[in-house]
Image (spheres, rainbow, N blue to C red):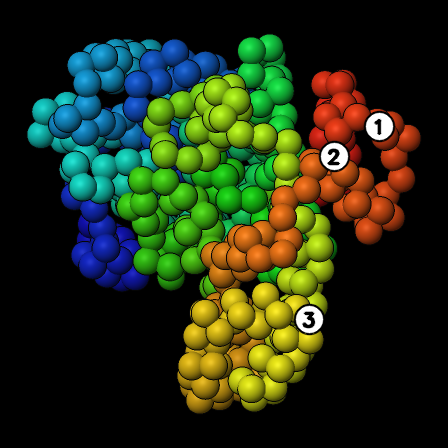
Amino acid sequence: MSSLPVKVKKYLDKYGTEVRPLTWRSSSHIEMIIVVPAISEYENVKQLLASLLAADNKYADKILVMFVVNNLKSSNDEVKIENQKTIEYLRAKLSDEISVESFSLGFIDAATSGNELDEKNGGVGLARKIGMDAALSLFNYGSSKKKILVCLDADCTVSQNYFTEIYEGFNKQSLHAAVVSFQHSFADETNREAILCYEIFLRYYVLCLRFAGSPYAFHTIGSTMICDVESYIKVEGMNKQKAAEDFYFLEKLAKNVHIEKINNAFVYPSSRGSWRVPFGTGQRVNRFLSQTQNEYLLYNFNSFLVLKDWLQLFLSNNFSAEEFLTEAEKIHQSLAAFLSEQKFEKAWSEISRTAKTDEQLQRQKNIWFDGFKTLKLIHSLRDNGFPPQPMFASLNRLFEEMKIEIDFRSGEEIPPFVVQVKYLEILRKIE
């Protein structure tokens, strides 16, 4: 590690994870590393690898695709057996010409006896962290180009321009952090309605945040996250969350650098149900299919009007805490109550005391009222006067506010699938 930059060494010494066996075709030219956690994903790993091999290889000699095959010691035998098949498959791929003809390939063994994830922290967050921390030692730091860390999931495929758009986007625009575009597939008819409903939910929320002027108006989907090494170190690396690791990682990044969008590169996540995380896509699909609740509801659009008014008030003024709370009460009493619950008065006193410049003050405002507090406010409003509303009526309202005309409105609360697809297509286009 003598050739590693000082900042990288310090990070690894303080925050790095326990080193696990890495098998890869070594290269001294690596500038972009795609980290892919994989647990019981044998068939999906093959499918993803085929997709990556079909992608542009303009920068192939600079790219490493690294799988983190992982399980707990307590994982069942079926998971462990499938992980061993995955390791054997990747080892076989390494012995053929894959790394010569295209990108470098590698895998970290976090699955066999003695290498498993620990029971307390083991999950997708730790698996990502193991891969991203290991990646820090593999970059060509002699190059002046960006050193890019890319997150992907084993159950995805990617667009043909995936590598090129990311590499050129970071280097030509000097990006520090970004997300790529995503689109779920509706090929599986058994759950296509479930995944369409969930994707509408995701896009509606982000568009409403953007409408409200939130600096946290971006998707927090693990398979779309990218950052450079400097930003990764600045935020002290990936967290070990077993779920929502993507939300918290991107939120940390957003407090330090701007999250950009790489519009023309796409990840196509799986639309399957899943046991791998306690919430997120897989669990939402499972819940939809179990019909335990009405999934065709969205956050009340009026709650985002409250958020918009609050952000305009908070980000544009330097009132006293009492004045802020008085003005918040005028916006809505539930907003004022929420701010009091969040100990706004104490927080604002501290921000006002420590921020020495207007720039610092603005940054501290965004750090305090972050993506998590934003979501908590929307949930608080949902429970106090702003109940969820029917999905497609909410979309109609959003489109009206954004002055987007549509010609396919249905009188039904839940329109036919083909009409639902048209709604989603508009959401994908305007985002």
Horizontal arrangement in the rendering, residue 327 relative to residue 85 (left or right)? right
* Mark 2 residue type: Phe
- How much space separates mark 3 and mark 2, taking CA atoms? 26 Å
Q: Residue at x 27, y 26 (%)?
A: 69
Horizontal arrangement in the rendering, residue 305 relative to residue 141 (left or right)? right
Residue 61, image x, y percentages:
44, 31
Q: Residues within 10 Å of mark 3 (few under 14, many from 20)?
A: some
On-image quarter of the C terminus = top right
Q: Please report contact status of discs 1 and 3: CB closer than 8 Å, yes or no.
A: no
Q: Is residue 324 visible?
A: yes
Residue 115, image x, y percentages:
14, 31
Q: Residue at x 60, y 10 (%)?
A: 189
Q: Residue at x 60, y 17 (%)?
A: 192
Residue receiving disc 3: 331
* Mark 1 residue type: Gly
Residue 399, image x, y percentages:
81, 44
Residue receiving disc 1: 411
